[in-house]
Image (cartoon, grey):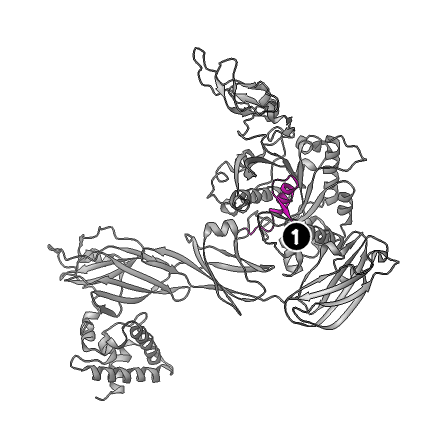
Amino acid sequence: MNVACPYCYERINPRRLWFRCTGRKAPGRPACVPQKDPARKELTGIDELVLPSFPAPGYGLRVVNSAVHDVCHAVSGVKVCPHCHSRMPPSFGEGRSPLIAMAGAPHTGKSVYLRILADQLRHGMGLRFGADVRLIGDEQFANTTGRADFLDPAGDLFPGGQLYAKTQPAAEGRRDPIVFAWRQRRLARYDTTLLSFFDTAGEDLSSMSTVDNLRYLGAADALILLLDPFLIPRARDQINLPKSAYTTNQSTVDVLNRVTDNLRESRHLGGRKNIPIPVAVVFAKIDAFFDVWGDIHPLVQRPEPGPYYDEASGRTTHEYVRSQLADWGAHDVDNHLAHNYKNFRYFAVSALGAEPDYDNDIIDPNGVRPFRVDEPLLWLLSQFGVVPGRG
Amino acid sequence: MSFDSKAYLRDVVNPLRDQVGALPGDLARHYGVEPRMTGADIAEQLDRVREFWEQRQGGSGAAARVCARMLDRDAQLRREHGDRMHDPDWWTDLPSTPDEADDFEEEEEPPPPVSRPAPHVERLRVTVTAEDSDTAIAHIAWRTPPSGRVSIRRSPVPPVWPPGATVRAADLRAYGEPLAGDRLTVGPESQIAVRVPGGAHVYTPFTLDDQGGGVVGEPVSAGVAGSVQRLRARRTGSEVVLSWIWPPSINLVDVTFTPADGPQWRRRMTRGEVAEQGCRIPAGASGGRITVCAVTRTRDGDLLSAPRSVTVEPVAGKLAYRLPKVGGPFSRGRSRMLRVTVDDLCEGVELRLVVALGTVMPARPDAGQTLLRFTGLTLEPGAPWEVPFTVPRRLARPYWLRCFVTRPRGIRVVDPIDEMRVS
């Protein structure tokens, strides 16, 4: 079973990982010292001195947990990716580790959504599913927040109420992912699933040339596709939106087309087959329609949370969103998805739960009230067997 | 004994007309209780003076307001002390002259520093209760020292002197402001209740000496918690999500949901809990009133802010329906039953069963063709309402069936998604 490296997206055999020397001294041998790593620099852009990485001897189907460096003869248990030499968690390869890509047009709110989703993963999701959910990599957040708050469990989600600045486009198609380890007891043993999220800058999708560079879409095992209902004219007409709430008139189906083409090309699918990976099609900012729909509208209801993905509620939501799209005159979105994807599901979420101040990028003063943001991820996890589905 | 209401009005009530905050002066004088009175005399006097207050409080003007305040305080005293107020001994512990009650006044000229320190008050109990958004009542109690008089001063900052230090009169006067109010002696304790501005204050006891200086006691910081602002409630199905703006430095709230029917729901939540999980109230279908009070915890108990409230509207009942196939295999799923159930009595119900060709569920009744229409239905809980129907042969698959409730408004309809699509 090959899985994608959560850092460089190359497919690797989890039983054939490399190891990184610890720098300890073995008897009678000099210790290894940090040195330049051209492979790491090429694939991750990180140009720093690191201890050398080396392959481990294979033992058939057995997972190798330590190896002896043949230069210094010291034993190391530090697993790294054979391609980019990024450090892997000790449990890497012991369970499904789906790479979940996130895509969407500019200003759809991907970064905000991912931040709220990551917060929900760290707070409450472990308790709900009886799992140990841990953040093990957040280079992207560290870069955008100065590493000040995200690793701090008591830190504010949006310090000073400020939303993020727009995510910078990926350099050479690559940006560091946000990686979570989901460790859970199944039957008689523990499985660790790595969840790796990539937050694209919307601009990466705005032209075909840059879409081609987004290698991660090709490596993704699943996709969260965030769509902005404000870009659907008849939806927008129903609500009072400030002009600053939507800065582009890009069509939703154009964004879809670009993602679809990239997925087809990266998977060498041609045009005859539909794309096999599960795609959660998420309509964001849905709180803007709550007042129009009223309290009893099915999309304003929140299902009872439990230690499972509520499949019946998910199917129901899917059909209501599809129906709403038709009512908004956006049949083309549904037609495109139905004719290009084997497995997709609609979701209606709100990361903030209330309209922010779009002019100043400030959240509602009453704070954030996330609405059903976890459901797309839980559906994908249920597709991979990480969480059970019910109903 | 006779009660001279005119003299009482002139001598007791009128001097209090311009007083703001707690009523200053001698409590025994306010009640007209004199040292030589017996228990029976005191009981009779209390009845008369209370009757006087009752009569006068309903009128207008300053005297009526004074009487109303007398009654308020009297109610509190009766709750706390009951019939012990009829006991002459109970009254002998009270300050006997107005001068003693006004013992918070400082002398004009600073006396020379004292050389022998008086015992200081070691522990003050302060409980502050919000009166409105700007003011509060501070109830202060302390153990009465064996000698010296105690003055409590309120300041935004704690004193610079440590407890036990002796302070000159001029320094003492420069620190904060004295609290003036009726002083009660209850057993070994002294108590006062005064109206104070909102916000946090430091209350410091000083045991006064003969020269106007004093010995610093242990200060206590207390105040009314600031209220939450912009309280909002949004119903998402059977639960209500609350949000508000937290006052600075407040991290705890008491949330109370009082439904129109059923038991009260109460929960204390921290700022962290609200940030992580949100404040969700399992309101069900019922409406009611939600109140949020900010809480500040002190060693002497919790300080509650003035409450903020929001009303939650009830939702009408829930209507569920099913569309089971009832025909045999030759009906090809065209013969079906519309079976409707409700969880509460619904009258005047208007139903429309709509069929829409294609793969998309109709969002509105006019997005499809009406198959059935019923008006004026009365649906009762526990008694399913059923009607068979047949989808016309000319309608080719796939198609959707959906039941809409067009009247009364506000009914929550539960759609059986898996039975609605026919493909």
Q: Between A89 and A230, which is closer to the camera in this rendering?
A: A89
Left or right position of B80 against B349: left
Give me the chain letter of mark 1. A
Q: Between B419 and A104, which is closer to the camera in this rendering?
A: B419
Q: Residue B53: which quarter of the image?
A: bottom left
Name the outermost residue toward the bottom. B2
The quarter of the picture where the N terminus of chain B appears is: bottom left
Residue type (three-letter) at the residue carrying disc 1:
Ser
- Where does the image place residue A321, in percent across and percent down from the top left? 70, 52
Q: Between A189 and B321, which is closer to the camera in this rendering?
A: A189
- Where does the image place residue A25, in percent across and percent down from the top left? 44, 16
In the displayed structure, A272 sits above or below B42; it is above
Q: Residue B330: which quarter of the image?
A: bottom right
Name the outermost residue toward the right. B394
Q: Residue A327: which quarter of the image?
A: bottom right
Q: Which residue is mark 1?
A: A313
- Where does the image place residue B138, in percent across and percent down from the top left? 32, 64
Check residue A380 for magenta coloring: yes
User: Is residue B413 at least partly visible in the picture?
Assistant: yes
Residue appearing at x 55%, y 28% in the figure: A88
* Residue range highlighted in magenta: A368-391
Check residue B282 for magenta coloring: no
Residue appearing at x 77%, y 54% in the figure: B421
Q: Counting other residues with Cα less than 10 Å from the Cα at mark 1, is it few (<14), some (14-19), or many (20 or more)?
A: some
Left or right position of A274 against B213: right
Name the outermost residue toward the left. B115
Secondary structure beneath label 1: helix
User: Is residue B9 at least partly visible in the picture?
Assistant: no
Name the outermost residue toward the top. A28
- Where does the image place residue A28, in percent across and percent down from the top left? 43, 10
